[in-house]
Amino acid sequence: MRHVVTESDTATTVGSGDVPVLATPRLIAWMEAATMEAAAPFVGAGRTTVGTAVRIRHLCASRVGELVEVTAQSPSTADGRRLTFPVQAVDGSGNLIATGEIDRAVVDRERFLAAVPAPAAGR
C-alpha cells in the first residue's frame, strides 16, 4: 500500500506530537490496513479479523509530500484463529522508516458485533 504524507497525516494534526511529520498513529493505521489485506486468504464467509496487538518501531520521520510504502508479509504465526504479521514501511528512497509485528484474531463478524456493549447513556 502506497501513501503520500499529507497535512492530515501529521503528528500536529492527529494530536500525537507537535511536529508536522507522519504521525505514528497514522502509520500504524496504514500498517493495520495492510494486514487486513494480507489476512484475506485466512478469512472465510461471515468472518473478519480484528487487531489485538501492535509492536512497531517508528525509526525515522517522514515529511509532508513524502511517499511511504507499507507492506505486511504472510503471517509468521497462524494458528487458525491468531495471525501475526511482520510489517514494515519504507520511504520513496527505500529507507526503512518502521518495522514490527501486528497480531489479528479471526472472528465471526456477527458474534463479535453482538458482544460489543452498547454505549452508556450520556456518552
Image (spheres, rainbow, N blue to C red):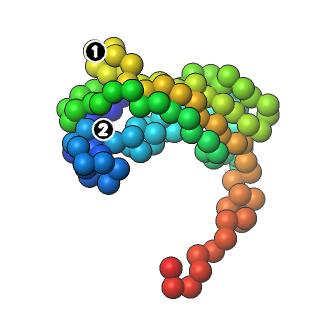
Q: Residue at x 56, y 35 (%)?
A: 55
Q: Residue at x 21, y 36 (%)?
A: 64
Tally the numbered discs. Answer: 2
Q: Is residue 80 visible?
A: yes
Decide: marks 1, 2 in contact (CB < 8 A)? no
Q: Is 20 displayed left or right of 91 in the figure? A: left
Residue at the spot of label 2? 22
Q: Residue at x 73, y 65 (%)?
A: 115
Q: Residue at x 71, y 65 (%)?
A: 114
Q: Look at label 1 and name its amino acid.
A: Ser
Whole-percent x, y for residue 18 in the image: 25, 48
Please rate how many residues cluster around mark 1, counting C-alpha atoms within 10 Å: few if below 14, some from 14 to 19, many from 20: few
> First in sequence: mark 1 or mark 2?
2
- Residue farthest along the top direction in this orientation: 94
- Residue farthest along the right direction in this orientation: 80
Indicate which disc residue 93 carries. 1
Q: Is residue 36 visible?
A: no
- Give above or below for 122 relative to 43: below
**Local SS, label 2:** loop
Whole-percent x, y for residue 95 in the image: 34, 16
Q: Distance from label 1 to label 2 (Cα)?
A: 16 Å
Please rate how many residues cluster around mark 2, counting C-alpha atoms within 10 Å: few if below 14, some from 14 to 19, many from 20: many
Q: Is 72 displayed left or right of 48 in the figure? A: left
Q: Look at label 2 and name its amino acid.
A: Leu
Whole-percent x, y for residue 33 in the image: 49, 38
**Local SS, label 1:** loop
- Residue farthest along the bottom direction in this orientation: 122
- Give above or below for 60 relative to 115: above
- Give above or below for 28 relative to 77: below
Whole-percent x, y for residue 89 in the image: 42, 25
Look at the image and tell me in which quarter the N terminus lies.
Answer: top left
Indicate which disc residue 51 carries. none
